[in-house]
Image (cartoon, helix red, strand yellow):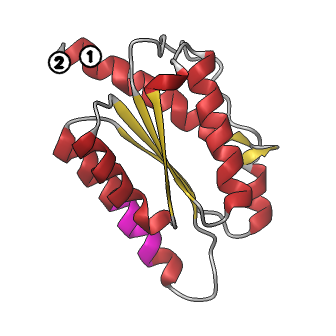
Amino acid sequence: MATKASSFSHLKVPSAEPYRFGIIVSQWNDEITIPLYNGAFNFLVKHGALEEHIKTVEVPGSFELSSGADILLANQEIDAVICLGCVIQGETRHFEFICNAVANGITQLSLKYNKPVIFGVLTPNNMQQASERAGGRHGNKGEEAAAAAIHMAELRRNLLG
């Protein structure tokens, strides 16, 4: 487990200006997902993405992130999708099932469409850990997901044209 805010400031982030992004965000645990969304959206804009080139879709929970991303990718010209959610460990195995399904679903979509679909889902043990990663002492993982989306959109364009 990380003990300090992760830093990706040493990475050169390409311009996001030529790309179109989708952000799929879970409404469940919105006290966490809204700051993640704001971090991702603002990071994209800060790095040149046009606001009108960012399509936001809300889904009920993290389990629905894959479905929302699939619908978006099938119907929109999008270069990369960022999936944002938060699944907090509970007393049952529900956490494991949801986290595995979402991770596998996002991976499968990336392969299906040959486009970056970024896993920006927090999987903390408790709400405090989630808050620390949604703008707290561990930074904002929404920003990191946006950085990954820009990098991967650039990589795809460079390799595939």
Residue at 59% x, 20% y: name it.
45
| Kind of residue at badge 2 | Leu
Q: Nearer the viewer, residue 73 or 133?
A: 73
Element class at badge 1? helix
Q: Residues within 10 Å of mark 1 (few under 14, many from 20)?
A: few
Q: Which mark is residue 160?
A: 2
Residue 102 among magenta residues: yes
Relative to 96, is 108 on the left or the right? left
Residue 147, given in percent of the width and then of the height, sits at 53, 27
**Relative side of 80 to 57, left or right:** left
Q: Does the rendering let one see residue 44?
A: yes
Q: Residue 140 location, x and y as percent?
A: 69, 40
Residue type of the residue flagged with mark 1: Arg
Mark 2 lies on a secondary structure that is helix
What number is the disc on residue 1?
none
Look at 28% across and 52% down and name the residue there: 70
Question: Is 125 covered by the magenta stretch?
Answer: no
Q: Nearer the viewer, residue 94 or 49?
A: 49
Viewer-nearest residue: 4 or 155: 155
The segment highlighted magenta reads 97-104
Dot 2, how many residues are within 10 Å of its Cα: few (below 14), some (14-19), or many (20+)? few
Which residue is found at the position 42% from the left and 77% from the top?
97
Q: Is residue 141 visible?
A: no
Q: On the rendered image, what quadrant is the N terminus found in?
A: bottom right
The reply to whether discs 2 and 1 touch (Cβ–Cβ < 8 Å) is: yes
- Name the residue beneath numbered marker 1: 157
Tell me where residue 141 appears, x and y as whole percent.
63, 42
The rendered magenta stretch, by its main secondary structure, is classed as helix
